[in-house]
Image (cartoon, rainbow, N blue to C red):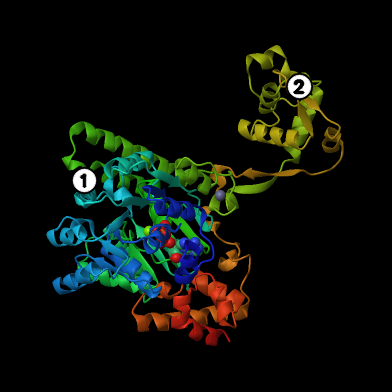
Amino acid sequence: MNKYEILKKYFGYDTFRNAQETLIDRILEGKDTLGIMPTGAGKSLCYQIPALMMEGITLVISPLISLMKDQVGSLNQAGIHAAFLNSSLTTNQYYKALSFARQGRYPIIYVAPERLVTEEFLDFALHSNIVMVAVDEAHCVSQWGQDFRPSYLKIVEFIERLPRRPIVSAFTATATKEVRDDIIDILQLQEPMVITTGFDRNNLYFGVMAVKDRYGSIRNYLEAHRKDSGIIYCLTRKQVEEVCERLIKDGFAVTRYHAGLSDQERRNNQDDFIYDRVPIIVATSAFGMGIDKNSVRFVLHYGMPKNIESYYQEAGRAGRDGEPAECILYYSSRDVITNQLFIDNNQDNKELDELTRTIVRERDQERLRKMTFYCFTNECLRDYILKYFGEYGSNYCGNCSNCLTQFEQVDITEMARALIGCVKASRQRYGTTVIVDTLHGANTAKIKNYRMKENPYYGVLSKVPVYRIRQVLNYLQMEEYLLVTSDDFAIVKLTAKSGEILEEDRPISMKLAKEPERQTKETQTGGRKSKRASFGQALFTEKEENLFEKLKSLRLEIAREEKVPPYIVFSDKTLVHMCVVKPNTKEEMLRVSGVGEFKFEKYGERFLKLIH
Ligand code: ADP
Ligand code: MG
Ligand code: ZN
């Protein structure tokens, strides 16, 4: 089977996403690769598909048990033989899996890094044909990353012991240069092809709310999103406890997760969330890596995280299925202090020498500063994040709280009249600075020399900030109500249209960012389009909304039978697609994104019947 057939048959998708195909081709050519793609971009397919096409076994190194379980569950559901080897197996199970592996039953085996150099595993590896080692969450090898795992250093040791060096592929969502260089160096990738895809996740809405009553705002949000599943991140365990308790009192079905709970409770609560038994989880940053639940519709932050990397990773757990989802940060100035304390008391840095510790602290401080700016910027929030990662956005995304509320249509008739009047009264002789200063009532040398205080417009806009007057001047120039000569003097001149503003009674307005003092962030997030609008702009009718709920119930029923999380049966996106397409036949059903042949055999008929 070729890669397209595999994509369709096992995963049910028609097309690869941007970078997937390139990465797959490179691996198939036998080359080392490093894929840097944001959460939800589809990194797993990049090693799973080559693994199914190559002769031999692919080992996938993954940092977390939950993550392996999830991925192997998905593969098995798609009809692919795969297994995981980690400490969640009993000794018996472990040996059984290993013996199946020896027989070549699994093309894909997930393994915890600390297992690699154990005797039994090495014995198996040395006598098998390991064709690829795929390192997932590869930033874990880097001390500069946020999730350094010493056991990841064993990967290189392991590879060196193999009789034949396998292809090494690595994948991460962390884009900073330090981490990327570390991955290449430490994993000793050979002439790797490095592919970085754009970091924009355009299905995510970003919002910042600086509100007095954070709890109340979050409660309101949850009330308005009763049917959705989401994560609420808190900065401290104590906050998790408090928020969770209050929400339960207020009648919400929520669970909690932080490092202070027993292993057992953590596992149970996480499963409750993943299996859709409880829609909302309140958690510290300890929760998340390896949470592949792809139908998370919102990620709320009760408090500001320590840096943009963490924020984008946590927020990025929303909307992995590509459907619209919301990421809202509820900010309070106390968050800066809390984070400062975290930096000052960072236990992880205790082992570092003095100099390194200072460097790390300064770096953390700088990251915190950039994170804090995020909460205050008037710019497009998405643009701010992308710029942080070194990308350039379009300044105005139309899908963040700043774009939607920080820009307003402002009547500028008075300002326009003053500007044009001033130019006319000074007989079109002066440059932009003099004009702006005159209107603002400045007292510079030029103003005195040119005797601008005698101009009837002197100081008439003294209450308007200079940058604002400039913005209006630029706008008038763009709209050709004024002209600025393109020589060094930049003299402001009138145009044929100038008279329309001065003489006629015509109002003029433009879009301007709101003044910081007047921001009313409380009123955000309202007035947007229905959530499921992304599917070819299709808005659900009431009937489709009903069908969607019914499909979800069927999915839950099947998930319970199969003992897998619902999203592993079909993603939200696939269900949405079914509602839109309303397939009648097997052929039509197979055209739905996410329905592969294997899954069709298993549950296709039941869904067809329900839709019918
Ligand atoms: P990552 O590891 O990059 O965070 P995953 O590999 O978990 O992302 O994939 C995220 C989601 O995208 C999964 O639900 C996956 O099935 C889906 N997906 C991956 N590739 C495609 C594709 N080519 N078309 C449609 N959906 C895809
Ligand atoms: Mg992944
Ligand atoms: Zn924006």
**Could one spot residue 215 in this view of the protein?**
yes
Tag 1 secondary structure: helix
Q: Nearer the viewer, residue 593 or 482?
A: 593
Above or below, comparing residue 438 to residue 542 in the picture: above
The nearer-to-camera label among 1 and 2 is 1
Q: CA distance from mark 1 to mark 2?
A: 65 Å
User: Where residue 364 sits in the image (x, y, percent)?
Assistant: 32, 40
Residue drawn at the location 49% of the way across and 82% of the way down: 604
68 displayed left or right of 210: left
Ligand 2 lies in which image quarter? bottom left
Q: Nearer the viewer, residue 298 or 123?
A: 123
- For residue 348, which numbered disc appears in the image? 1
Q: Which quadrant does the C terminus fall into?
A: bottom right
Residue drawn at the location 77% of the way across and 43% of the way down: 508
User: Which quadrant holds residue 602?
Assistant: bottom left
Residue that protrudes farthest toward the top in the picture = 449
- Tag 1: residue type? Asp
Above or below, comparing residue 75 to residue 301 in the picture: below
Q: Nearer the viewer, residue 316 or 400?
A: 316
306 displayed left or right of 295: left
Give the residue number, with chain letter if any, for mark 2: 455
Tag 2 secondary structure: loop
Tell me the crowding category of disc 2: few under 14, some 14 to 19, or many 20 or more residues within 10 angstroms, Cα based.
some
- Tag 2: residue type? Asn
User: Which quadrant holds residue 608?
Assistant: bottom right
User: Where residue 112 sits in the image (x, y, percent)?
Assistant: 23, 59
- For residue 38, which numbered disc appears in the image? none
Of the two numbered discs 1 and 2 on the same chain, state the one appearing first in sequence: 1
34 displayed left or right of 417: left
Q: Nearer the viewer, residue 45 or 229?
A: 45
